[in-house]
Image: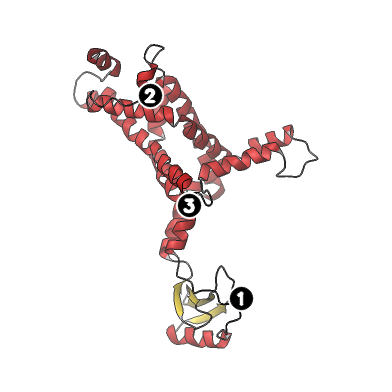
Amino acid sequence: MFQVHLWTGIALGLYVVMLSITGSALVYRTELDLFFRTPRPEFKQGAPRKSTEEIRANAARLYPGWTIASIGQRISRRNPTIQVDLERAGATKERLFNPYTGEDLGDATTKGEWLVLYMARMHDELWFDREGRYVNGVLSGVFTLTAFTGLFVWWPGVSRWKRSLGVKMSGGWRRFNWDLHSALGFWLFLFSLMWGISGFYLGVPEPFSDLVDKLSDPNLEYGERRGDLILMWLSRLHFGRWRDNEPLKALWAIVGLVPTILFITGVIMWWNRTGRVWFKRGPAFDPSVQDSQSV
């Protein structure tokens, strides 16, 4: 069990770090999109608007040499702008204009918004569309195995299990690193398990949906079956984008960084046990020995 936990953890290390950091950031995806996007004017119901020809003339004046491919016609309360698409020598430009003043507001999709989208694609599908989602699902299954074996390895015995619930500050940095890895892994085991199972479902949904279809009443509408609700909550728990609950979102973003800490502390433990010996001979660190000596 220890070897399975060690080598699956090392093999998945950088992958888990990537998911951990991007996942925590994407808890605030809506806020990031609003922060990076081109500022929109206030929606004014019934206010006079610039005509399409006026918008066209202003765009032509601001971007000489560009051909106007299309001009948006409708605005909404959520997006009170007019999009103008321009082309030149195979290049394209998408700009937003103020429908009330004709002012050029900026890019329809800013570099910051592209960065958020790039990060989301990296997290969801590893930039490989459906194939990437499938790989993500399989690796999430391996991560679930790592979490289970970690819980097994964590068990220190009947007489010492309470010591493994916290971090001992006076036992040296190696002891601190071991305790931090052990305690975080235990207290956040359910989070890790949830992310592993939900990640597997999001990447390979067919076994889950087939099981729901097999066990559920076929006469019920989709979304009313208990299995459908469970799958919906799996997705919601995975992303943690809770509406109108900022403390819960903050908790998800902070806890989402824990797999990164577990990887770093795990690599340090591996280095103390094995890696260091490859480069310099010396005794491997055994926390049980140090703990018994300190007692």
The picture places residue 159, in percent across and down from the top left corner, at 38, 11
Of tags 2 and 3, the one toward the viewer is 2
What percent of the width, then of the height, locates residue 69? 55, 78
Q: Secondary structure at mark 1?
A: loop
**Which numbered disc covers residue 120?**
3
- Name the disc covering residue 74, or none: 1
- Labels 1 and 2: the sequence-earlier one: 1
User: Where 104 sits versus 38, above or below?
Assistant: below
Label 1, label 2: how many angstroms apart (C-alpha)?
59 Å
Q: Secondary structure at mark 3?
A: helix
Q: Quadrant of residue 32?
A: bottom left
Q: Amino acid at mark 2?
A: Leu
Q: Circles 1 and 2: CB distance less than 8 Å?
A: no
Closer to the eye: label 1 or 2: 2
The residue located at (55%, 38%) in the rendering is: 198
| Rendered position, 260 above or below 105 | above
Of badges 1 and 3, nearer the viewer stands: 1
Q: What colour-coding does the image apply?
A: secondary structure
Q: CA distance from mark 2 to mark 3?
A: 34 Å
Q: Are marks 1 and 3 in contact (CB under 8 Å)?
A: no
Residue at image position (27%, 13%) is 292
Could you tell me the amino acid type at mark 1?
Answer: Arg
Regarding mark 2 in the picture, which secondary structure is present there?
A: helix
Q: Check disc 3 and give the amino acid type.
A: Ala
Disc 2: which residue: 165
Give the mark, 2 or 3, whose residue is nearer the N terminus: 3
Relative side of 172 to 226, left or right: left
Question: Which corner quadrant holds the N terminus?
Answer: top left
Q: Residues within 10 Å of mark 1 (few under 14, many from 20)?
A: few
Residue in the image at 27% along x and 16% along y: 291
Occupied quadrant, residue 4: top left
Residue 154, x across and y down, in percent: 40, 21
